Amino acid sequence: MGRFVILVIDSCGAGALPDAAAYGDEGANTLGNMARRVGGLHLPTLESWGLGNLTEIAGCPPSGAPRASFGTMAEMSRGKDTTTGHWEMVGIVLEKGFATFPNGFPPELMQEWLRLSGAPGYLGNKPASGTQIIEELGPEHLATGWPIVYTSADSVFQIAAHEHKISLATLYNWCEAARTVGKKYGIARVIARPFIGEPGKFVRTYDRRDFSQPPPPGTVLDLLSQAGVQVVGVGKIPDIYDGRGIARSVHTEGNADGLRKTEELLGDLGASLLFVNLVDTDMLYGHRRDPAGYARAMEEIDRALPAIASALRPDDVLVITADHGNDPTFPGSDHTREQVPLLAYSPRRARGSALGVRESFADLGATVADYFGVGAPRGRSFLSQVAA
């Protein structure tokens, strides 16, 4: 038993799911459309591992002998958000999606939140792009001290506040209150969105925190914890699972920091699950519809992979995947309903195998459970096609 590493490239979709039209996402393909828009990607490591075998990616052709096992995973749950995707990875398939609020939150919810949080008031309360709404309402926020509340097509209650106007402790307390109120309204996640700067030059910071509803008991993470297997969550992973089953949490300041800390952790960790989320592809480039930035982020990840792979021990397994899509060439600023990549690298194997289209993200959790010898709530393990 060695280390199992999951690198989630947040929002790195690999083509629309069959039901994408029901979400308004027919034709979405984060990797394919982004690569075509920028004139091709340079991803030598991911190309050699079989990324180009999953969907047509300009500059990243299929490999005749991929070094990693390769396939895609379809999302069985209803939804296309971070919580839904990550929960399904550990065995929780949602038959009913979380509540969304296309017209903003109802007055009774907001009044209950004000009473519980003690916030002086609020601005916004509408679906919006995070960067756009702080530019729109940031000056009024600085004048009044009222937080900016907004949502998106996902089940999120987002609270933005300037760090020099509202302390992080206060912002986080307001978010805790919103999570308490939001539970009965079916809201998956509350996100603290601190920012700094001046009007016209506001910048969001990495003091962001996610306040998720706790997943139901019995996830793969719970089973690992009960079996004494250490789970290390890097980036926003601990927040997504509300700390459930996470033995150690590692904060990151963006993808470069997350990749560096992943390599460092591999130098010290014993048998464990190392679960990493790389958020910049989603937060900085997918939502902001920036294909060039997305391409640079993918190339940054590719450059970091050889060092991470070299830090693996013979019995380790490294899986690269995503939690949903966020096609930066698509209209709007919301996630897209897509299948996600599945690349599984084993130092012992000179060549990977085809994993096909997995019917659920839960297959990843089942594989982790199989690796560590614990039961899985659902899903079909592909460990025999990955480990030597």
Image (cartoon, rainbow, N blue to C red):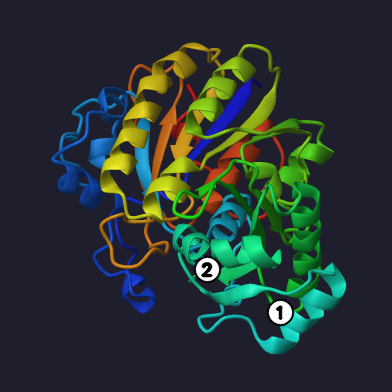
Disc nearer the start of the sequence (1/2): 2
**351, 27: nearer the viewer:** 27
Decide: is 1 above or below 147: above
Label 2: how many Cα within 10 Å (few below 14, some 14–19, many 20+): many
Residue shown at 58% from the left, 52% from the top:
86
Residue for point 20% across, 30% down: 63
Residue 326 shows in this picture: yes
Q: Quadrant of the N terminus?
A: top right
Left or right for 230, reference 277: right
Taking the image as drawn, is residue 355 in sight?
A: no
Where residue 30 sits in the image (x, y, percent)?
A: 30, 52
Q: Where is residue 248, by image quadrant?
A: top right
Q: Position of residue 322 (x, y in %)?
A: 45, 46
Give the x, y percent position of residue 151. Answer: 56, 70
Which is more toward the observer, 308 or 125? 125
**Residue beneath disc 1:** 185
Q: Amino acid at mark 2?
A: Asp
Return the x and y of residue 328 as percentages of the image width and height. 31, 54
Q: Residues within 10 Å of mark 1 (few under 14, many from 20)?
A: some
Q: Which mark is residue 154?
A: 2
Marks 1/2: CA–CA distance: 14 Å
Vertical order, 280 against 109 (above or below): above
